[in-house]
Amino acid sequence: MINENFIYLSFLISFAGGITYLVDTIKGKAKPNRISWFFWFLAPFIAVAAEIQKGVGLQTLMTFSVGFNPLLVFLASFINKNAYWKLSKTDYIYGALALLGIILWKVTGEGNIAILFAILADGLASIPTVIKSFKNPETESPTIFLLSLINASITLLTIKIWTFAQWGFPVYIFLIDAIIFSLIKFNLGKKYQKSLTKQ
């Protein structure tokens, strides 16, 4: 366990990742899936409210940061006409499921359930970007996902009391960012497709 003040460092690391993706989006190098990025800012902000309700403390800053960066990216995707991914019917289905998760949270209103549904909503909204990172990794930028993964790792190392409210969202962020970063950085989807054609 490390001092919880390291969370400030992890916030800066995550914010730096957000800036790199923001710049890549404005330049048209990265093409964010707007469904994913919309819910990636909405779900964490809901989780922030729930974590505050549950008295999580400074670790809430990590959850805030993983919502704030996507808000900036989502807005930036409207600046450059080439800086967005064309949405398919499947993207809208995952978006609707993510919205359902948020509605279910509002119905229950309990902190831990809110965090769980925020994770589910965020996870469902991640599927279009996971698929895009698998099929078209060149349309993504890996840095934001790596730095967000580091942010989650540092946050997990600061936890003193291991309740779901404390570790739920950081563990989820660590896992989803590890998946997306690996798909983009190592072109796993392209390598997999090549291996199928060789057989």
Image (cartoon, rainbow, N blue to C red):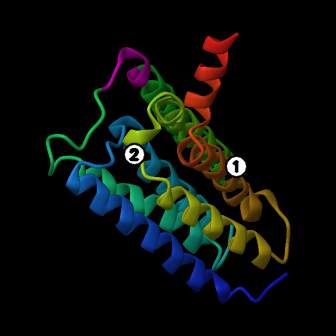
Between residue 135 and residue 73, name the one nearer to us: 135
Q: Local crowd at mark 2 within 10 Å, few (<14), some, or many (≥20)? A: many
Tag shown at residue 37: 2
**Residue at horizontal 46 percent and vertical 33 percent from the top:** 99
The percent position of residue 116, horizontal first and vertical second, equals 67, 45
- The quarter holding residue 107 reads top right
Q: Amino acid at mark 2?
A: Trp
**Residue at horizontal 43 percent and vertical 18 percent from the top:** 90
Would residue 42 be visible to someone looking at this image? Answer: yes
**Residue at horizontal 46 percent and vertical 48 percent from the top:** 40
Per the picture, the main secondary structure of the magenta-coloured stretch is: helix
**Image side of residue 157 versus residue 99, left or right:** right
**Element on which disc 2 rests:** helix
Mark 2 vs mark 1, CA separation in Å: 17 Å
Which mark sits nearer the N-terminus, 2 or 1? 2
Would residue 103 be visible to someone looking at this image? Answer: no
As drawn, 158 above or below 14: below
**Image side of residue 4 versus residue 43, left or right:** right
The percent position of residue 176, horizontal first and vertical second, equals 63, 46
Between residue 36 and residue 181, name the one nearer to us: 181
The percent position of residue 140, horizontal first and vertical second, equals 41, 45
Tag shown at residue 103: none
Residue range of the region highlighted in magenta in the rendering: 87-92
- The quarter holding residue 105 reads top right
Asked if marks 2 and 1 touch (Cβ < 8 Å), the reply is no
The residue singled out by tag 1 in the image is 175
Check if residue 151 falls in the magenta segment: no
**Element on which disc 1 rests:** helix
Q: Local crowd at mark 1 within 10 Å, few (<14), some, or many (≥20)? A: some
Q: Amino acid at mark 1?
A: Leu
**Quadrant in which the N terminus is drawn:** bottom right
As drawn, 98 above or below 186: above
